[in-house]
Image (cartoon, rainbow, N blue to C red):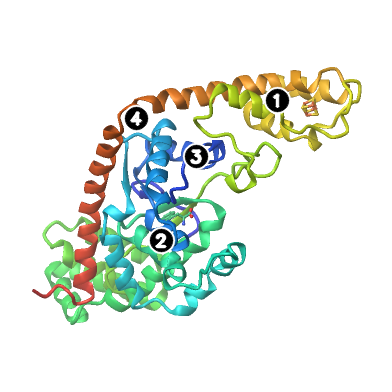
């Protein structure tokens, strides 16, 4: 199960709007999204409701953050021609699914989520003993399952949430995957296979159920899939009947662990707004220069003639992200032998970062000048997302017996 076959999988990920993004977001997340969009059907969305779980006391900050963030996505090369970008609150189906899933979600699963206690500890000045905050991972589950996404690119801290969405999907399928009269309907479907194939199906099913013969299971799957004259519903029943389960209504997603980015901030800690050590994606050249020039270096290098140790210097960590091997050896040698000064050492970095941020600023320009463009991209994306979420909700309502009229 651990090897993920990503082919043909729908990819979905979300980000809470936190305003202008920084280089840590670019190297840690957006670069990856921009790559995935060329390999998969991708959905990326602004998790604005998730912000409300912690910022319900000042929701006014959300709107500006949403648009700043989307412009940064676009500047990073996430492209509306290759992926669907939307806003969570524009697809109310997420809320309906959240509500329906809440009926079958044990409280203990939510209380056990590591982020629940952790965030409450961390944000002590806020009252997070709310219903909405407890439901944070369940809302995330609804985000994912509404699209029947197969792969969810996230950082390590979010893996338990994706795991929870797997457990909830499994629980859902267990309760509702079996339509009333399932066995009878499956037996009827077998007859529709024709005499020869029905016999084959029964034999293969017995081999799998009684002997655990995986080959038999695979063979039966293939036979059912390739059968040309039975309905899709019957195919699903026949496949569900093979392993004793019912229909899979909500498939279990997999976390797609984002390659770890060791993007350091200006002080060598992880780049993060709360550490006040960031370079924004659209930072001006002057600011980039100033920020890097005033970065701390190895404290042992007081004078130019004191040799330094790159391993004790946050500037070196930035070289690890940006510099080619020849520059890195120049730094190592120059630093440890006091052959170069710290300002000299910083210059190639300043050049690289200015090049990168200049490109982002240039990409962002047309969107900054024409906000309607961004609104349209999101409106179109939200419509497209909604069409899919609506289909899922029809399946969900039907499975839960709510499709009466
Ligand atoms: N909780 C995620 C984070 O803080 C954001 C998020 C919300 C998300 N819904 C999601 C990520 C669905 C992936 C899939 O980063
Ligand atoms: Fe850091 Fe470079 Fe100065 Fe060495 S020379 S201490 S790596 S800035």
Looking at the image, is mark 4 or mark 2 earlier in the sequence? Answer: 2
Q: Is mark 2 within 8 Å of ligand 1?
A: yes
Q: CA distance from mark 4 to mark 3?
A: 15 Å
Taking 137 as reference, is 155 left or right? right
Which residue position holds label 4?
367
- Of 238 and 147, nearer the camera is 147
Can you say which quadrant of the picture contains the C terminus?
Answer: bottom left
Q: Which residue: 65% across, 39% down?
A: 265
- Of 271 and 155, nearer the camera is 271
Q: Is mark 3 within 8 Å of ligand 1?
A: no
Q: CA distance from mark 1 to mark 2?
A: 41 Å
Taking 377 as reference, is 348 left or right? right
- Give coordinates of residue 71: x percent, y percent: 39, 35
Question: Looking at the image, which residue sits at the far left?
Answer: 405
Q: Which residue: 52% across, 59% down?
A: 159
Q: CA distance from mark 4 to mark 1?
A: 30 Å
Q: Which residue: 86% across, 26% down?
A: 336
Ligand 2 shows up in the quarter that is top right
Looking at the image, is mark 2 or mark 3 earlier in the sequence? Answer: 3
- Give coordinates of residue 27: x percent, y percent: 54, 37
* Residues at discs 4 and 2 in contact (Cβ within 8 Å): no
| Secondary structure type for disc 2 | helix
Which residue position holds label 2?
140
Looking at the image, is mark 4 or mark 1 earlier in the sequence? Answer: 1
| Secondary structure type for disc 4 | helix
Q: Quick one: label 1, few (<14), some, or many (20+) residues within 10 Å?
A: some
Q: CA distance from mark 1 to mark 3?
A: 21 Å
Which residue position holds label 3?
21
Looking at the image, is mark 1 or mark 2 earlier in the sequence? Answer: 2
């Amino acid at each position: 199960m651990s090897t993920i076959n990503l082919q043909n999988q729908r990819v979905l990920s979300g980000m809470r709007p936190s305003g202008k993004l920084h280089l840590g977001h670019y190297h840690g997340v957006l670069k990856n999204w921009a790559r995935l969009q060329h390999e998969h059907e991708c959905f990326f969305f602004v998790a604005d409701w998730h912000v409300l779980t912690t910022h319900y006391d000042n929701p006014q900050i959300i709107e500006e953050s949403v648009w700043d963030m989307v412009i940064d996505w676009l500047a990073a090369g996430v492209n509306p021609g290759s992926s669907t970008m939307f806003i969570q609150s524009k697809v109310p189906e997420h809320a309906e699914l959240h509500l329906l899933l809440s009926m079958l979600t044990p409280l203990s699963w939510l209380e056990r989520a590591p982020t629940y206690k952790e965030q409450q500890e961390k944000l002590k000045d806020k009252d997070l003993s709310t219903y909405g905050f407890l439901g944070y991972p369940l809302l995330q589950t609804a985000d994912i399952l509404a699209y029947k996404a197969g792969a969810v690119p996230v950082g390590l801290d979010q893996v338990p949430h994706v795991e929870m969405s797997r457990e909830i999907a499994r629980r859902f399928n267990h309760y509702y995957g079996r339509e009333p009269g399932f066995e009878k309907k499956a037996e009827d479907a077998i007859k529709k296979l024709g005499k020869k194939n029905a016999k084959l199906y029964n034999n293969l099913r017995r081999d799998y159920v009684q002997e655990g013969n995986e080959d038999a299971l695979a063979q039966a799957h293939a036979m059912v899939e390739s059968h040309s004259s039975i309905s899709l519903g019957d195919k699903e029943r026949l496949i569900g009947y093979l392993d004793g389960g019912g229909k899979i209504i909500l498939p279990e997603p997999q976390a797609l662990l984002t390659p770890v980015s060791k993007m350091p901030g200006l002080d060598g800690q992880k780049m993060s707004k709360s550490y006040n050590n960031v370079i924004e994606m659209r930072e001006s050249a002057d600011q980039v220069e100033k920020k890097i020039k005033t970065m701390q270096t190895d404290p042992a290098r007081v004078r130019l003639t004191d040799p330094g140790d790159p391993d004790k210097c946050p500037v070196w960590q930035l070289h690890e992200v940006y510099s080619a091997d020849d520059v890195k050896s120049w730094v190592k040698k120059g630093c440890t032998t006091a052959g170069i000064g710290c300002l000299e050492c910083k210059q190639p970095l300043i050049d690289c970062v200015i090049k990168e941020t200049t490109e982002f600023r240039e990409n962002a320009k047309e969107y900054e000048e024409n906000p309607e463009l961004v609104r349209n991209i999101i409106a179109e994306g939200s419509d497209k997302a909604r069409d899919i979420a609506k289909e899922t909700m029809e399946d969900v309502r039907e499975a839960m017996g709510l499709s009466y009229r």
